Structures are given as C-alpha cells and as structure tokens.
Amino acid sequence: MEILLAENAGFCFGVEKAVDAVYAQLADQSAGTVFTYGEIVHNEAVTKDLAAKGVKTAESAKDIRGALEEAKNGGGAENACVVIRAHGVGAAVYDTLKEQQLRVVDATCPFVRRIHETVRKAGEAGETVIVVGDHDHPEVQGIVGWAKGPIAVVSSPEEAAALDFPRGSNLTIVSQTTFRRHKFKETVEVFSGKEYNVNIVDTICSATSVRQEEAERIASEADVMIVVGGAHSSNTRKLYEICKGKCSATYLVQHAGDLNTQMFEGAARVGITAGASTPKNIIQEVQTYVRTRSEL
Ligand code: SF4
C-alpha cells in the first residue's frame, strides 16, 4: 500500500504561533493563570493537554471576570493573562480586557489582523463592508467587530443577491481567510454585476488554498483518503468535503484510534492530509498506523 502524505498538512503558521504563545506563557515562571479567549485550536488533544496544565478557556468577558475571581481565591490571579487566538476578536473585546486590566497576549494571525485593519479603514472612509464567510465562524465575528459603519456577512451568492444598496455605493469586500476561493469569486461576481463601486480585497489565506489544492490532487489519485482533524474545525470539514468529492472512500478522523483495517481493504494508495489545527504528532500516529497495516 502506497502512502501519499500531504506536505501541507497540520498546523498553519498562525495556529502554530498561537499555540506556541500559550505554551510560552505556561513556561514563564512569572506568569499567573493563563486564559485563552475561546479554544486556542479546534483540536481535542491539544486543548486537553493545555487544560491539564491549568489553561482556562473563556468564552466571554463575563467568563474571564468569574474565572479571575476564582483565581483570586485560589491564587494565580497575579500576572494572569488572556491569549487571543489566531482567529482574532472584535475591537470591543480588547476594550473589555483593558478595562479589566488584564495582560493580553495577542496571537491574532497577522493575516487576520490585516483584515481587521481593512475593515476599520473602509468604515472610517464611509464605505460599506461585505464579509464573505460563515456567519457563525469566530473569525468572521471578530472581523465584524472592527466595523466603523455598515457591514454585512454573506456566505453564498444567493445571500449576496438578496442585498440591495443605493446605486453608486462604495463597497469593500473581504473574505474569511479559510473560505473557498471559487465560492468567494462566485459571491463577489454578484456585486460586480450591479452599479456599485466595488473594492475587492482577496483575504483568503494561501495556507488554506495550498492545503486544499494539494488535498484535492492527492484525493483524486488515492483509493482511500484520510483527513485528520477536529470534528469542530471548519477548515478540516472543508478539506473533508473537497476530498470526498474526489475520493468516495474519504474518512474524517480525529486520531489514529478512529482508524480500522476495514477502511483500507483493497486499497493500493492511501492519501493523508490534515486540517490547520492538527498537531504533527497526531498526523505521524495516523501515518504510522497506515504504514503498519500496509506491511502486514
Ligand atoms: S489559515 Fe492562514 S490566516 Fe488563518 S490562522 Fe492560519 S495562517 Fe493565519
């Protein structure tokens, strides 16, 4: 059995930087309790490891306030910090954290930070901002939180078609970094066909498109395709959909423990890729499992 392992599998630059930032705080003797604003990465193995080391996940400013009170009683409140994950957060979150005099370790991916800046500046210039992305995705909610004027989120050409602005409106269009490029183009075309002044800023991260294109190519050559990643990771689910489109025997697994020998029956070539939130050791375990079975 031949293994086709994607070169662009696992943590992207932004996620790696954010996870490293949390471990760096844990290693810093002078740091108090470490909080992350939302799960630092959609991967159970990593979040469990961090939780075991005392990292707390906060979903809101209220959570942090409550957890801080606890920390005061139990120690660790001094020099406590909040790590902002790669997805980033809206401007109001920074304000709240500042009000609470919390030390912020900002691990927002620089590519996401650039979108925040684009949105802020467009709003200040009086333009309407359109974000092409998934409404519920935390990155999109963070982007919306930098709006200084009208802003709308659309996830499909149909949703874009339902929007109506006065003729001659100035629109700045950005994308969620992990959105699929062809869907972004289709959605943007809806606005280009109307009488607006449209400024399209393609903010799709190349780490995502490179990973997706490679996965698609490998899946089209493989008999069985394994996508490794968290069930709640949107980029992992997108990878799965892409691979499934090319290889019907595509499986989404969180770790090697989800694999079984029946999956590989009769397969000559097995492809392996992984979402941006999958650590290297988990990919290696999956690869070892497949290699061991292929040698039996
Ligand atoms: S996918 Fe790209 S934009 Fe998103 S965190 Fe990773 S490197 Fe940054």
Image: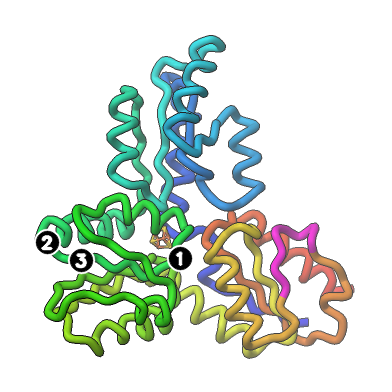
Residue 263 seen in render = yes
Residue 205 seen in render = no
The residue that mark 1 highlights is 134
Report the image quarter containing ligand 1.
Answer: bottom left
The residue that mark 3 highlights is 128
Q: What element carries label 1?
A: loop
Residue 132: x and y in percent read: 36, 70
Residue in the picture at 38% in, 85% down: 186
Label 3 neighbour load within 10 Å: few <14, some 14-19, many 20+: many
Above-or-below relation of 58 to 204: above
Amino acid beneath label 2: Gly
Cβ–Cβ under 8 Å for marks 3 and 1: no
Above-or-below relation of 138 to 198: above
The residue that mark 2 highlights is 126
Q: Quadrant of residue 217?
A: bottom right
Amino acid beneath label 3: Thr
Q: Nearer the viewer, residue 158 or 217?
A: 158
Q: Quadrant of residue 279?
A: bottom right
Q: Is mark 2 on a helix, strand or loop?
A: loop
Residue in the picture at 61% in, 45% down: 46
In the rendered structure, which segment of residues is drawn in magenta? 251-258
Label 1 neighbour load within 10 Å: few <14, some 14-19, many 20+: some
Left or right: 189, with 219 as reference point: left
